[in-house]
Amino acid sequence: MMHLRIVVLWACVLFFLFICPAAADVEASRNSVVAIDAPGVEQLTREENCPIFISIMTSRCGACRSELTAYQEMYEKYGDEGLGIFVVSIDFGTSEEIQGLVDQLGLTFPVYWGGEKVMKAFNISFVPYKIIVSNGRVLEKQIGGWKSTSEFEAKINELFEACER
Amino acid sequence: MVDIRRLIQTVSVFLCNAWMLFPFTKNIYQGELKSVCVPGLNCYSCPAATGACPLGSLQTFFAGIRPSFRTGSYHLGLYVIGMLGLVGGLVGRMPCAWVCPFGFMQELLHKIPSRKMEIPRFLSWVKYGVLALFVILFPLVIVDVFGYGENWFCKYICPAGTLEAGLPLAFLQPHLRELWGALFYGKLAILVLLLVLMVYTRRPFCRVLCPLGAIYSLFNKVSVFRMVYYPDRCVRCDECYRNCPMGIKFYEGANQSDCIRCLQCMRKSCKYGAIGFSINGVATIVPGPKEKTEAVSG
Amino acid sequence: METKGSLVSYALVLLFLVLLVAGINAGEASVVWEKAITICLSCIGVG
Ligand code: SF4
Ligand code: SF4
């Protein structure tokens, strides 16, 4: 009786472990995650784009992951008009996890990996953490992401108005 | 006199939450100590926390198991499982009574004078459901497009998280308050409900909901440290039941799954020496029947 | 009967000790650390 239960339990565990999806096939035109340091992130705020949204996140944060789709959607829509989207992962130790996310969703905007160093330099203890820049000026630096894609889109449009072109 | 258990509990609260600079840094403690799980339920997002929460960490591993296979790191959570099993294998559910800050708070709240009531017994089974579903199964199987699950227990239930992290952080970082939504108010409702129940009934969270207690309780009957019952001495006076923080009738079984080995019954309640404990199968204290000094005078 | 019980507990303790060490060797401590010091908003009920 006891044994049976244990066997069933282990069977379940193994089942869920191994039916997990195999590694996504990686195309040749892979968007490689680039390593970045703290000054590099500072540099991002001085890019020519307007407005600029920088999101600092970790792969294991659900709220951060769910934002990536919104970022991709908006990037496809407004990327040509000058919108800048930069995602910086601060996963500890390795960039493999964030690279996995990029490959899976086929993200096309630039994604960086800063690791613990960027976390320490920016004194980050909450993810997602976003930095919003317009006309070379940092408007907001704050905890938390976007409630919905539409909220994000409204913000983009609001900031587009103010961009000097 | 200061009760030794109260003393240890108090010390433990301060050890688990020793980062007292948070009102100034407006931030949490981020040192290396946080790679070690504490044995009790103590939210690691608490600004003062100095250790990691075993349940939160466990869910994190389960939720990230597919990506970890993908990247070839094969993190199965053995670190946390091993730590929990080690503690459980040695002392069973003892941490609940001696070091768990959340348990301590429940005992203190219960001291508020009021009409006391008892929880229906079958509710103790609920915590195994919470463990199986919210801590293990949901994080493992309900995954997003990336193959990551979520910390279901932390996200939807954990009252310790709301109390120790959700509320204080909202005051340290006012911006967080703007993000409060249905999720937060739901968790707040769970917390408030439990806080009220804690006054009226003994350790409601431990007995009904706590998945950590559920894990440790599996070890109660096989741990190195075990309670021992001497039936010939017991007179069924029910004194043990009256003082037990978990509402257990000791004579119904020496190592019931809800017994947290607080030793209250052995040290304080039983006048007849019917309760003892054993280490490694050897009864270390075989209490003789205590003299009924107060009882005889007449 | 007493001895048998204690053998089981020793076996358990040993088993979990091995798991613990295996976990540490696999570098799991740093995962715990990461999760404990970069707070994900879902842990505090706001996301
Ligand atoms: S207090 Fe002692 S004698 Fe009284 S019921 Fe409990 S175990 Fe039996
Ligand atoms: S039975 Fe005794 S040791 Fe167990 S929880 Fe109750 S009072 Fe504590």
Image (cartoon, rainbow, N blue to C red):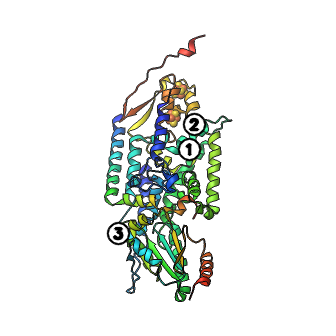
- Choose between B46 and B265: the one closer to the eye: B46
Q: Is residue B254 visible?
A: no
Q: Disc number at residue B72?
A: 3
Return the x and y of residue A100 as percentages of the image width and height. Answer: 41, 75
Residue A37 lies in what quarter of the image?
A: bottom left
**Mark 3 or mark 2: which is in front?**
3
C-alpha separation, residue under disc 2 versus residue under disc 1: 9 Å
Q: Chain of mark 2?
A: B
Q: Amino acid at mark 3?
A: Gly
Q: Is the C-beta separation of discs 2 and 1 under 8 Å? A: yes
The first of marks 2 and 1 along the sequence is: 1
Which residue is labeled 1 in the image?
B207
* Quadrant position of residue B34: bottom left
Label 1 near ligand 2 (CB < 8 Å):
no
Q: Amino acid at mark 2?
A: Gly
Residue at mark 2: B247
